[in-house]
Every structure is written in C-alpha cells, then in structure tokens.
Amino acid sequence: MGVNLAVRVGALELKNPVLLASGCCGYGRDMEPHLDLARLGGICLKGLSMAGSEGNPPPRIWETPAGMLNAIGLQNIGVSRFRLEKAPDLSGIDTAWIANFYGHTVEQYVEAAEALDEEPALHGLEMNISCPNISEGGIAFGTDPHSVYRVTRAVREATRKPLWVKLSPNVADITETARAAVDAGADALSCINTLPAMAIDVERRTFRISNRIGGLSGPALRPVAVRMVYQVCGAVDVPVVGIGGVGSAADALEFILAGARAVQVGTALFLDPEAPLRILDGLEEYCGRHGVEDVNELVGAVRDGAPRPGCHG
C-alpha cells in the first residue's frame, strides 16, 4: 500500500495537502501547460472583488535576495466576469477550487461572498482580510480582532460554502485575530499573507516598485510564517493552511509538523512551475523513508527541545 496523502480541511476532503496559492496561478487553468492540475489537492484562485480592479501601475514586481516583492494591487476581472468566463472551465479538472475574494467594506465582502456562493464549480471560499477598511479610516480589516470578527461573521451568514480566512501577519499577536475569525464562524485559517516591505534603487534613488511598499513573499517569509502557524494551531481548534516560502517537501513539512493540515505554494511557481509536483513526490518519499503510512500522522508532530550543539543523538 502507498502512503495516504489525503487530508481534511474543515468540510473539504483534499486528495493531498499541496495547493496553489492565490495570486500566483490565475483564475484556474492558467498553469495547465506547466503541470498536471488534477494531481494537486486544490487551487486558490486569484483574488476577486465585485467591481474588479486594474491594479497598480508598473513596475509591480521586484525580485529580492530571498523572495519577491509585489504590489499588483489586487488586479482582477471581477466576480461576474469570473463566473461567466472562467468558472465554466473549472469542473473539468478533479481538484478543489477555492475562490479568494476581498472588499473594502463589510458590505462589499458580503456581496462578493453571496455571488460566489452561487457558483457550483467552487468548493470553498478564502477571504482576504488584509485590505483597508475604507469605512473605518483605512485600517486593514485583518489587524483588528473586532473588525476580523465583524467581517467574518457577516460573510459566514452570506455563504454555505466552507470559509477560510487568510490572516494578516501585520499584528502584535496573530492568535487574537485567529480566535476572532474562528469565533465568527471560519471553517479554517490560511496563515499567512505577505509582509509589507520595500526596495530602493540606490543608483537612481528611486523605489523599485511604483507603489513604494509591496508584499514580501518567498523563502525570506517562511520562518515567520512557520512560527505564526505554530502559534495559531495552538490557539484554535480549526484546521490551518500554511503559506509562506514553500518551495520543497522539507519546507512543506515544516508547516505540517508545526500543525498545518495543508500548504499553499506561491512564489516558487515563478522559479519552477512544477515545484508543487516535486513537493508531492518529496512528501511521499519522506513518509516512506520514515515509516509514516498517513501524512496526517505528521500534523503537529514537532518534538519539543532543539538539539544542543554537538549533540547528534
């Protein structure tokens, strides 16, 4: 018998714990020329809003020494065009489709959730709460537990689909916003979104991206994300999906051992579109090498106590 890689994230049964992260794989089949999408546990689609957005002017991406800085500005075609032009193509591929969505008011979030709830091709929703709340002075929803609770509760009442809340790392204590989302009805948490960062061209004395500040992703983010996943898993009783610099099986295993049920692969796709399949193969090889019959045995299985220098036992 082979290794069981199937995992459950709330109400969703995934064939394995490897998903594609929102914003890195388009609206579904964009990555199809590069990898077999049906082998994946799921795909989180590019973030959608009701009205759509043209995003920020270029330049919008800059490679950093250990990752990537981006300020795309949540460019998207809008929920209506997505349902008309993209959603009909999703049902032909056997994987879980998760629609990422956002708004700038509670009402916008609810409207998007209601519309996406009616789309039969979708298996779940992932709510991006890192957006500024224009009704309350532009403070991001995800940085205030009260705002997290309010928007999550409103969206929970607007959809019957599984609801994942994507947490912002830009908080003093991520367990507070995690608990607020769970108390409001989140089925699972995606952890974490990008960190705000900046790069400057010292010769031209200009910013590398037009927005000045962008979101840092990739390997540089991973140690922060693993720590936050570990803290969140210890604070709530819903599944957590780990995000941040996953490019290898070892990276994915860090998140799983810290407590994540699944992981999302994002920035690594720009370097190697087949990275998710290598990660899958690596997970299976690791389990076989360690006598693990079910990948769920590894969830939260990190052992206390780091080895002391010179101790190899």
Image: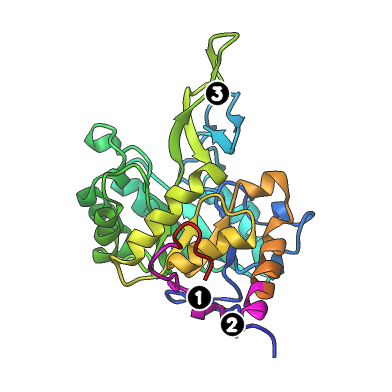
Task: Give the vertical position of 62 relative to 82 (above or below).
Answer: above
Precedes in sequence: disc 3 or disc 2? 3
Q: Which residue is mark 3?
A: 209
What range is drawn magenta here? Answer: 286-306
**Residue that appears at 52% across and 71% down:** 313
Circle count: 3
Gap between marks 3 and 2, in whole Å?
45 Å
Which label is found at residue 237?
none
The type of residue carrying mark 3 is Ile
Task: Return the residue at label 2.
Answer: 292
Amino acid on which disc 2 is placed: Val
Secondary structure, mark 1, is: helix
Residue in the foreground of this view, choosing between 150 and 289: 289
The answer for how far apart the CA atoms under marks 1 and 3 are is: 40 Å
Residue at (43% x, 39% y) in the render? 195
Residue 293: in magenta span: yes
